[in-house]
Image: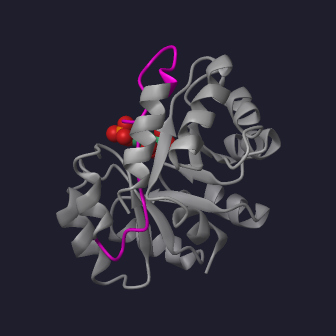
Amino acid sequence: MTRIDTIMRTSPVIPVLVIEDAAHARPIAEALVKGGLRVLEVTLRTEAALDVIREMKKVEGAIVGAGTVLNEQDLRRSIDAGAEFIVSPGLTESLGRAAIASGIPFLPGVANAGDIMRGLDMGLDRFKFFPAEASGGLKALKALAGPFGNVRFCPTGGITAETAPTYLAEEAVLCVGGSWLIGKGAPDVAAIEDMARKAASLA
Ligand SMILES: O=C(O)C(=O)C[C@H](O)[C@H](O)COP(=O)(O)O
């Protein structure tokens, strides 16, 4: 059991967050945690992302990670900001080795058998299946689960509240990721909490 395994089993959905304004971070995290989603992936896609991680970490119960971590520099910046886990869209040797050496729970993206085998060579067996829908969706995931019986996935990319349950029904799937829970701009915390509650009950 790895620590990333524990994080993946904490809730069925990991919200993938793209937040432009650090002032929105706390209300969004509070609404998500209140709704039952404690694991939060803050993508490094915005200028505010590192401040968002710092703010969200102040919310009791939140487990805050960094997403869109592309290289060692992103890894370092994320760890310095207090990220508790790291998600990347793909797996490179340099990022993989650095993440493993740092000891932080790490969920790298894979899209095919070669990616998974490269991860297994590094000692990894928990992956983000990305981009899930564009890479063949459930059909591809089931096919990949065949030869890699001990591997577990967090499919992400194109997944919706409607399609999440079909993924979660698979033994190889511990959780799914998605950006559908949060709209753009000023947060509607009641709506976010409601979406989170529905997502948390999908298990
Ligand atoms: O930014 C990253 O690190 C990514 O790997 C991509 C995100 O996880 C997906 O873009 C979320 O997908 P949607 O739920 O379809 O919006």
Front residue of 100/126: it is: 126
Q: 38 above or below 45?
A: below
Q: Is residue 161 visible?
A: yes
5 horizontally vs 140: left or right: right
Residue 116 percent location from the top left of the image:
42, 70
Whether residue 191 sits left or right of residue 26 in the image: it is: left
Residue 197 is one of the magenta-drawn residues? no
Numbered range of the magenta stretch: 170-189
Residue nearest the observer in this picture, 120 or 162: 162
Q: In which quarter of the image is ligand 1?
A: top left
- Quadrant of the rendered structure where residue 139 is? bottom left
The residue at the point 39 percent across, 55 percent down is: 201
Position in image of residue 95 (x %, y %): 63, 55
| Quadrant housing the N terminus | bottom right
The percent position of residue 90, horizontal first and vertical second, equals 47, 53
Question: Residue 56: horizontal and vertical position, in percent?
Answer: 70, 36
Q: How many marks?
A: 0
Depth check: 43 or 9 in front?
9
The image quadrant that residue 111 belongs to is bottom left
Q: Is residue 173 left or right of residue 47?
A: left
Between 162 and 137, the one lying in front of the other is 162
Q: In which quarter of the image is residue 26?
A: top right
| Position of 120 relative to 135 (above/below) | below
What is the quadrant of the C terminus in the image?
A: bottom left
Residue 21 drawn above or below residue 162? above
**Predominant secondary structure in magenta?**
loop
Q: Which residue is at 22% across, 74% downward?
A: 143
Does the magenta segment cover residue 177?
yes
In the image, farthest residue toward the top:
186
